[in-house]
Amino acid sequence: MKHRTLRGTIRYTSDKPERLGQERGREYFIMTDQSDGVRVIHAHCEIDDAPDVIRDVVLSLAADGSPLDASVRLTVGGKFEGTGWMRFQDQVSECESFNQRAGRISQRIANPAPLTGMGTHPICGDALMLRAYDLTRGPGRQFFPQMMLSSPDHRGATGPQLFPLGLGLEFVGPEAVEVPAGKFDALHFRYVDTAGQLPEEHPAYDVWCTADGNYIFLRGCVGGYMKTRYELTELRGLELPA
């Protein structure tokens, strides 16, 4: 066998005092590293908070972590919201989608430089985008102007369509992390520098991923009005430390 497949589950819980620790959603993902260096991610996401969201995503990444193509389908409040397909090349990003609010959407956006990352809103993908950070420079901040989102909504509950933005990543440092899925050597990052680019400013967002080069999501905490937490509860296919 010339490929490797990982399977995992992420639990969404609330950090609000009146709902502390209450489960508010879940995510199931499959990642396959193919023999050609491409990583393909399948993610099924469920957010229970009204209006509830069901999101199904397939995202393909090149060996350097840059996006190749993606498909996203959304159900919001128990009703179909939208579906779309996206393709990324060095100089252009394309999207063909249909949304119940806007109808058929066709986009072709010129890229001044190849995209660094594509956020399709599965939580597992928030860790994969951290690969853009140059760890040889140590802790600090780095800004990445060539990014895309499939929705500017904080829950990813609109679209899907292409939304360009730049964002910063702050590397806090290496840490040991224990989550329901086990104990891991981790890297701690923070998403920063999105001010003025989104319809509503996103609260502070800390993410921990595996330190083994796989960038598997382990834990995430969002502050502000969201006050939510994400934790990896199950992981299969990756050899865990003793």
Image (spheres, grey):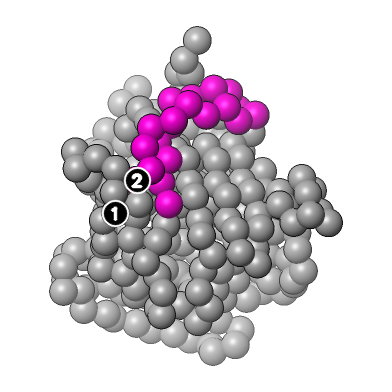
For image coordinates 32% across by 32% down, the residue present is 213
Check residue 13 for magenta coloring: no
**Can residue 156 be seen in the rendering of this structure?**
no
**Can residue 149 be seen in the rendering of this structure?**
yes
Distance between the alpha carbons at the discs numbered 2 and 1:
6 Å
Q: In what quadrant of the picture does the N terminus appear?
A: top left
- Numbered tag placed on residue 141 in the rendering: 1
Check residue 183 for magenta coloring: yes
Q: Quick check: 83 left or right of 2?
A: right
Q: Helix or strand or loop: what does disc 2 sit on?
A: strand
Q: Which residues are magenta?
A: 171-190
Among the 4 quarters of the image, the one containing residue 162: bottom left
* Mark 2 crowd level (few <14, some 14–19, many ≥20, 10 Å Cα): many
Amino acid type of the residue tagged 2 in the rendering: Phe
Residue 211, placed above or below residue 12: above
Asked if the residue at tag 1 contacts the one at tag 2, i.e. Cβ–Cβ closer than 8 Å, the answer is yes
Q: Position of residue 151 (x, y in %)?
A: 49, 72
Q: Helix or strand or loop: what does disc 1 sit on?
A: strand
- Numbered tag placed on residue 112 in the rendering: none
Residue 209, placed above or below residue 119: above
Amino acid type of the residue tagged 1 in the rendering: Arg
- Numbered tag placed on residue 171 in the rendering: 2
Q: Position of residue 240 (x, y in %)?
A: 48, 18
* Mark 1 crowd level (few <14, some 14–19, many ≥20, 10 Å Cα): some
